[in-house]
Amino acid sequence: MTMKQDSAPAATGRIRVGTSGWRYPSWRGDFYPRGLVQRRELAFIGERFSTVELNGSFYSLQRPGSYLRWRAAVPEGFVFAVKGSRYISHMLALREVRSALANFFASGVLALGPALGPILWQLPERHRFDPEVLSAFLAALPRTTGEALELARGHDERLDGRAWLEECVDRPLSYALEPRSVSFDDPALRELLDRHGVALTVADTAGRWPEFEPTEADHVYVRLHGASELYTSGYSAAELRRWAQRCIHWSRDGVGAARDVYVYFDNDARGHAPHDALALARLVDDSRVDDSRVAHPEARS
């Protein structure tokens, strides 16, 4: 029996729980039933979760056809978080990004339509907090899909013949930032992100990188990379209960309104991520923590 996560009660924001990516060989014959063809894996995810973090967009510009195919594979109401291009975050180091942002949005991100959720910008550990650079980057980000489309029309020749420039319903865009340098532990960062309405990612990294508390954005973005070993270890039942409690609190703790919480498990090296995600989804499903609702994540049927 599988459980698909529903909305939290009306008094709270919605807590969406999923995985970072979905195409992992170690999941086949474990989380994915033996014999499930690869092209059906995202649909399998969509039947069990309400969101997934799309991470291929971090490594290279995807194609519009891929975004359309991914959108068609999941049910209505499903949400994709999209990782921003590492060319922008790691190579350009957030500087002089207008052309690269145009290419990113022209590559097909907007083809997700209403299934497009938060866009995550993950920074490398070497990237130190520079208020001027970050402020300019945040100011360059389009705030709506209409603004993103207008920006995308300025793409360079690399996107000629493969850009997605279709008119779309104008919707707000939301962003999250995941820094990994301790230099970001600065009150000026929170002030800057709050001014732009950008979420500061809460990342559990087995102590490798700093863990920040959420900003006052209208959503909370959480990445769980591993409790004791980065990308490798699973989460115990007690650890999952603590994360459930935090997520429930954040969903009720919006500034002026409840806010949505997006949680993605990235401890995929040994296949823990989807099982831990299902367990956490069960815990937050009724916006309460009840020991009887979830088995230990290693007890798999």
Image (cartoon, helix red, strand yellow):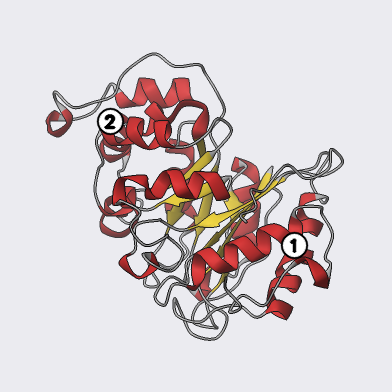
Closer to the chain start, of discs 1 and 2, is 2
Q: Nearer the viewer, mark 1 or mark 2?
A: 1
Residue 43 at what x, y percent from top left?
Answer: 44, 43
Q: Which residue is mark 1?
A: 283
The quarter of the picture where the N terminus appears is bottom right
| Secondary element at image label 2 | helix
Residue under the point 53% across and 39% down: 79
173, 31: nearer the viewer: 31
Q: Is residue 165 above or below residue 246?
A: above
Task: Examine the rendered structure and indicate whether residue 58 appears above or below residue 296.
Answer: above
Residue 188 sits in quarter: bottom right
Q: Position of residue 198 (x, y in %)?
A: 58, 46
Residue closest to the far top: 167
The local crowd at label 1, few if under 14, some if 14 to 19, many if 20 or more residues have their Cα within 10 Å, is many
Question: Who's the residue at 39% across and 75% down the image?
Answer: 269
Question: Farthest residue in the bottom direction?
Answer: 228
Task: Look at the image and tell me whether residue 88 can be seen.
Answer: no
What mark, if any, has residue 30 been given in the picture?
Answer: none
Q: Quadrant of the C terminus?
A: bottom right
Q: Name the foreground residue: 21 vs 152.
A: 21
Amino acid, disc 1: Leu
**In screen coordinates, is 300 left or right of 260?**
left
Q: Amino acid at mark 2?
A: Pro
Q: CA distance from mark 1 to mark 2?
A: 36 Å
- Residue 209 sits above or below residue 200 on the image: below
Q: Which residue is mark 2?
A: 64
Q: Residue 58: horizontal and vertical position, in percent?
A: 33, 52
- SS for dot 1: helix
Q: Is residue 41 visible?
A: yes
